[in-house]
Amino acid sequence: MIAPLLVLTAACGGGDDESDAGTFDDVKVTGKVGEAPEVKGAKGVEVDKMTSRVITEGDGPKVAEGDNATMRYVIIQAKDAKEMGGTFETEAAGATEMNSEQDTILAPALVGKPYGTRVLIGLTGKDLGQAEGESADDTLLIVADVLSKWEPPKPTGTIADVSVSAKGDQEPKITLKKTPLVVAKTESKVITPAKGKKAETIKEGDSVSVRYVGVNGRDGKTFDSSYKSGGTVDFELKQGQMIPGFITGLVGKKMGDRVLITIPYTDAYGAAGRPDGGINGGDTLVFVVDLVKKAAPPQG
């Protein structure tokens, strides 16, 4: 949805510094669809309710309710014409679900429009759920490009296409026999079993201290690793706290196991991906996890 973008760092060119405020209809947006727009006449513009207009109409099939659509957009604070965030310069590619009940900003402006369309949206802080305060009445402008319908990747392999090697306490090396590796379901296996017969079995809801390394199935590159800090990380294996595949892969294993997990996008970050982590929509994730010890449950 659009709200999380409000904390992103501005990344693409656009705002102006004109002193004479015009109306929403006076705002001019130029540039090619899919590329960072140039926006003129934004400074001082005010709207009292959400509105939108087409800047460039595409020639593709129409966006349907429920489509996962690849998009680019930028948010501009109208009072000073400064950019608050955007995705035009983001390398990771994901999709936005055109669900008018969940997304009350982008979906209503784009459903029914042809793919390849650029729209300008005007809204206030209230439209983002800010009920009171100075920012509730601030006008925001969004330039949004709906590029194409997102199609899920087809499976190319399984957990059998992953090998793991390690030396001592060093970070395990994950090697993919093929890239991109796309799996159809979450799979896991113990590659180094716990020592001793009394090792505790992991249950859903447990808090655990782990070491881990994660590799993106798209290119085989490491996107996250706790080994860089040298310590352990505590996770609560609870729905809503972790991606579902991580929980599925560890529940039933024993404390002390080293576990290999392959996770499809449906059990990870979905069609949207995780742009701040370099994860595209549809990416398979591969983890090696060392279950070190039980952790204290989170407080509160």
Image: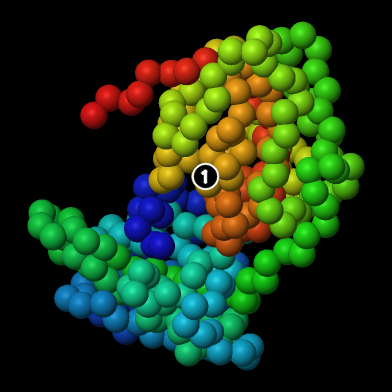
Quadrant housing residue 137: bottom left
Q: Is residue 204 above or below residue 151?
A: above
Q: Nearer the viewer, residue 69 or 122?
A: 69
Q: Is residue 221 above or below residue 92?
A: above
Q: Is residue 76 above or below residue 119?
A: above
Q: Which x, y percent locates residue 184?
A: 72, 57
Looking at the rendered structure, the kind of residue marked 1 is: Ile
Number of numbered discs on residues: 1
Q: Quadrant of the N terminus?
A: bottom left
Identify the residue position indicated by label 1 in the image.
243
Q: Nearer the viewer, residue 162 or 59?
A: 162
Q: Nearer the viewer, residue 20 or 72?
A: 72
Q: Which x, y percent locates residue 90?
A: 58, 53
Residue shown at 61%/90% (left/top)?
61
Residue shown at 85%/43% (left/top)?
161
Name the colouring of the figure.
rainbow
Residue ranking furthest to the front: 197
Quadrant housing residue 168: top right
Seen in the image, is 115 located left or right of residue 119? right
Residue shown at 40%/81% (left/top)?
109
10 Å crowding of disc 1: few (<14), some (14-19), many (20+): some
Q: Which x, y percent locates residue 134?
A: 12, 55
Badge 1 marks a residue whose secondary structure is loop
In this view of the protein, can residue 20 be seen by the observer?
no
In this view of the protein, can residue 255 be seen by the observer?
yes
Q: Is residue 49 above or below residue 212?
A: below
Q: Quadrant of the C terminus?
A: top left
Residue shown at 20%/77% (left/top)?
49
